[in-house]
Amino acid sequence: MYHQYPMCPGYPANPANPYYGMPESFMDMYQDNSGLTEMYPEVYRRIHPRVIEVCIKYDAYCDPRMYPRVEPRVLEEMVDNVYRMEATQPYAQQYTTGGLFRSLISILLIRELLGRRRRRGFGYYF
């Protein structure tokens, strides 16, 4: 049986192709993520380039402190570097109390490091 879903609004006509029957002009709206990236807060847009800069500096395959797992003190060292670069900025002053700013930096660093360690499938050479 080809159709697993009942033929009613809200269910795709072809489960293998959920965009079946959708006009081509709507596909551009679904594939464009620029509206979502513009919704990031200002503090994220200022800190994220520093996080990438620190990750490029520290994330080396030959460093035993980074591979196969990141040691917690290395992560704290990375957080300290980003914090020192950004703590004097006026937008950071509102986040420095209570460790919220350091927590945000830690989250961004961990997310960036996890993204760098993503395993590629067979046949991907980039």
Image (cartoon, grey):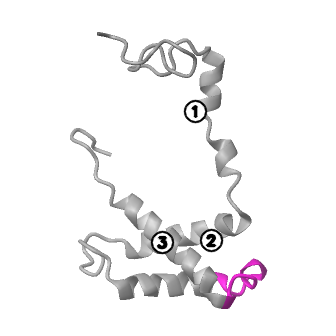
Q: Earlier in the sequence, mark 2 or mark 1?
A: 1
Span shown in magenta: 86-97
**Relative to 32, is 116 above or below?**
below
Q: For residue 109, which numbered disc appears in the image?
A: 3
Q: Position of residue 18 (x, y in %)?
A: 47, 22
Q: Residue at x 46, y 82 (%)?
A: 78
110 with respect to 81 (left or right): left
On the image, which quarter does residue 91 sit in?
Answer: bottom right
* 69 left or right, relative to 34: left
Amino acid identity at mark 2: Ile
Q: Residue placed at 62% from the left, 35% from the top?
A: 32
Residue labelled with disc 2: 47
For marks 2 and 1, give the CA distance. 26 Å
Q: Position of residue 9 (x, y in %)?
A: 58, 17
Residue toward you, 86 or 43: 43
Q: Which mark is residue 31?
A: 1
Residue 110's disc is none
Q: Residues within 10 Å of mark 1 (few under 14, many from 20)?
A: few
From what the image shows, is residue 78 above or below residue 15?
below
Instruction: Specify the quadrant of the image occupied by residue 66.
Output: bottom left
User: Looking at the image, which is closer to me, 114 or 61?
Assistant: 114
In the image, taking residue 73 as reference, residue 8 lies left or right, namely: right
Asked whether the viewer can see residue 25, the reply is yes
